[in-house]
Image: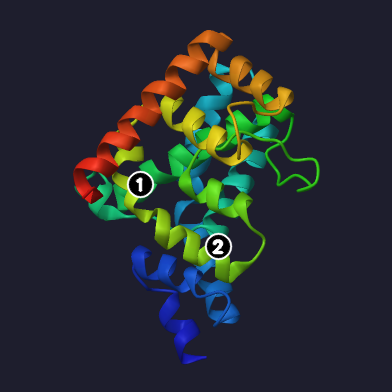
């Protein structure tokens, strides 16, 4: 009970850390998540409202997107202030949430919903390294190991433009041999990124080259 009371006044970074311990300390994580949502609900909704207004979407859609955004925070409480361009942690988290909101809006625009789909029918685009790791395996231990192995790519992926990053990660997930990806995924890339197949191929080549150069320079023999 004492820990739960402390959580109510904990810093935002501590709240995210508690959320990250949901497997070991579920009650504390849920309490921290509740406090975090109350603390940033208005900021997240303001972002969702602005994005939705520009697309002629309703306030109801904005609320739904906020719920999806916080659902992502629950699964991935991965804010890193060292990578933030904000001077304060509070503003950094608000900007981080705004990006999550924007991603959920993209999901809504593309699929008609931002809620998690059934894994058997999910052929969504891959926006972040967390998305890639989540969809690569169902095993939590393997997922953790994979995330650690791929952590070296964080820097270069942060430097890639949004379209380069999405195309690179999407291709990495859906292609194991050769260069072909499922046709529905290819169509989604074209529609969501407003690119032709030739442009997507060029973006993929550029992203692969940047990643390969980065790995050779930093981890090559």
The residue closer to the viewer here, 88 or 104, is: 104
Q: Measure the C-alpha gap from mark 1 to mark 2.
A: 16 Å
Q: Residue at x 68, y 33 (%)?
A: 61
The residue closer to the viewer here, 5 or 214, is: 214
Outermost residue, front side = 221
* Quarter occupied by residue 108: top right
Q: Dot 2: what SS?
A: helix
The residue closer to the viewer here, 20 or 7, is: 20
The residue closer to the viewer here, 27 or 204, is: 204
Q: Dot 1: what SS?
A: helix
**Among the two numbered marks 1 and 2 on one chain, the one whose residue lies closer to the N terminus:** 2
> Where does the image place residue 70, in percent across and percent down from the top left?
56, 52
- Relative horizontal placement of residue 159, taking residue 100 as reference (left or right): left
> Where does the image place residue 127, in percent across and percent down from the top left?
51, 37
Q: Residue at x 42, y 26 (%)?
A: 164
Asked if 214 appears above or below 154 in the picture, the reply is: above
Mark 1 neighbour density, 10 Å: few (under 14) some (14–19) many (20 or more): some
* Quarter occupied by residue 23: bottom right
Q: Residue tagged by mark 2?
A: 143
Q: Residue tagged by mark 1?
A: 153
> Where does the image place residue 128, in percent across and percent down from the top left?
48, 42
Can you see residue 77? Answer: no
Mark 2 neighbour density, 10 Å: few (under 14) some (14–19) many (20 or more): some
Q: Residue at x 48, y 69 (%)?
A: 20
Asked if 157 appears above or below 71 in the picture, the reply is: above
Asked if 93 appears above or below 95 in the picture, the reply is: below
- Relative horizontal placement of residue 80, taking residue 194 as reference (left or right): left
* Quarter occupied by residue 190: top right
Can you see residue 80? Answer: yes
């Amino acid at each position: 009970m004492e820990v739960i009371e402390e959580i109510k006044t904990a810093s935002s970074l501590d709240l995210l850390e508690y959320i990250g311990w949901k497997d070991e300390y579920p009650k504390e994580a849920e309490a921290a998540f509740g406090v975090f949502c109350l603390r940033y609900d208005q900021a997240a909704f303001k972002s969702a409202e602005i994005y939705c207004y520009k697309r002629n979407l309703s306030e109801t859609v904005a609320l739904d997107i906020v719920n999806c955004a916080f659902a992502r925070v629950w699964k991935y409480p991965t804010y890193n202030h060292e990578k933030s361009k904000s001077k304060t942690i509070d503003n950094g988290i608000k900007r981080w949430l705004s990006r999550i909101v924007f991603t959920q809006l993209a999901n809504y625009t593309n699929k008609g919903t931002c809620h998690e789909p059934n894994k058997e029918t999910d052929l969504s685009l891959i926006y972040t390294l967390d998305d890639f790791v989540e969809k690569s395996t169902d095993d939590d231990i393997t997922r953790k190991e994979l995330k650690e192995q791929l952590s070296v790519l964080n820097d270069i992926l942060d430097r890639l433009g949004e379209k380069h990053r999405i195309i690179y990660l999407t291709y990495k997930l859906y292609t194991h041999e050769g260069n072909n990806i499922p046709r529905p995924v290819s169509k989604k890339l074209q529609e969501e990124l407003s690119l032709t197949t030739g442009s997507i191929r060029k973006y993929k080549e550029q992203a692969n080259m940047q990643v390969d150069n980065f790995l050779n320079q930093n981890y090559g023999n």
